[in-house]
């Protein structure tokens, strides 16, 4: 069960604090995700390749509509962030160009990451999903 605590008790324990000033709140100044466009297109390509493998591997009349919906969703997941990055005129920053990405890498939450490491981190999950789809369709074809 939950109990209501008196405000005086919470104040005495130091659990009530003032809200942060409005100026100190983080703002979305950089909307381009800090990655070059070819890398994001690679993610999109891996997911579309996965859907193509599944479509060919499990071709059936009943799966046409679900696969079309999946393709629409993957396309939307690629299109909406690209439009969101340039949504407000003050935020029309271009994505990181490939040459600068190769030279300097990117800053992540855990520190500076080289271009190769960042590429591996970004493309690892979509590649694993594609290989899982290939394995699944291969197993289904052999059974």
Image (spheres, grey):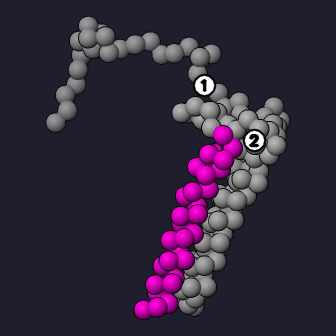
User: Is residue 140 one of those drawn in magenta?
Assistant: yes
**In screen coordinates, is 102 left or right of 62?**
right
Question: Depth check: 7 or 72 in front?
Answer: 72
Q: In this view, does 73 lie above or below 90?
A: below
Question: Depth check: 66 or 115 in front?
Answer: 115
* Element class at badge 1: loop
**In screen coordinates, is 88 left or right of 107?**
right
Question: Residue at label 1?
Answer: 26
- Local crowd size for mark 2, using a 10 Å CA cut-off: few (<14), some (14–19), many (≥20): some
Question: Residue at label 2?
Answer: 101
Question: Depth check: 127 or 9 in front?
Answer: 127
For the N terminus, give its image quadrant: top left
- Local crowd size for mark 1, using a 10 Å CA cut-off: few (<14), some (14–19), many (≥20): few
Q: Quadrant of residue 134?
A: bottom right
Q: Residue at x 51, y 82 (%)?
A: 137
Q: Distance between the residues labelled 2 and 1?
A: 25 Å
Most frequent secondary structure within the magenta stretch: helix
The answer to whether one can see residue 87 in this image is no
Q: Give the range drawn in magenta.
A: 114-143
* Element class at badge 2: helix
Q: Quadrant of residue 130?
A: bottom right
Question: Depth check: 21 or 132 in front?
Answer: 132
Q: Position of residue 37 (x, y in %)?
A: 77, 51
Q: Position of residue 15 (x, y in %)?
A: 32, 15
């Amino acid at each position: 069960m939950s109990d209501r605590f008196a405000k005086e008790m919470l104040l005495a324990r130091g659990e009530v604090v003032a809200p942060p000033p409005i100026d100190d709140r983080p703002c979305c100044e950089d909307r381009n995700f800090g990655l070059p466009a070819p890398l994001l297109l690679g993610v999109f390509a891996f997911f579309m390749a996965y859907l193509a493998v599944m479509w060919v591997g499990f071709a059936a009349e009943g799966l046409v509509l679900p696969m079309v919906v999946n393709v629409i969703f993957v396309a939307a997941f690629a299109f909406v962030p690209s439009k969101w990055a340039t949504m407000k005129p003050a935020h029309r920053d271009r994505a990181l160009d490939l040459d600068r990405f190769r030279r300097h890498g990117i800053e992540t939450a855990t520190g500076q990451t080289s271009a190769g490491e960042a590429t591996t981190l970004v493309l690892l999950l979509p590649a694993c999903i594609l290989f899982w789809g290939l394995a699944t369709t291969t197993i289904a074809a052999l059974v």
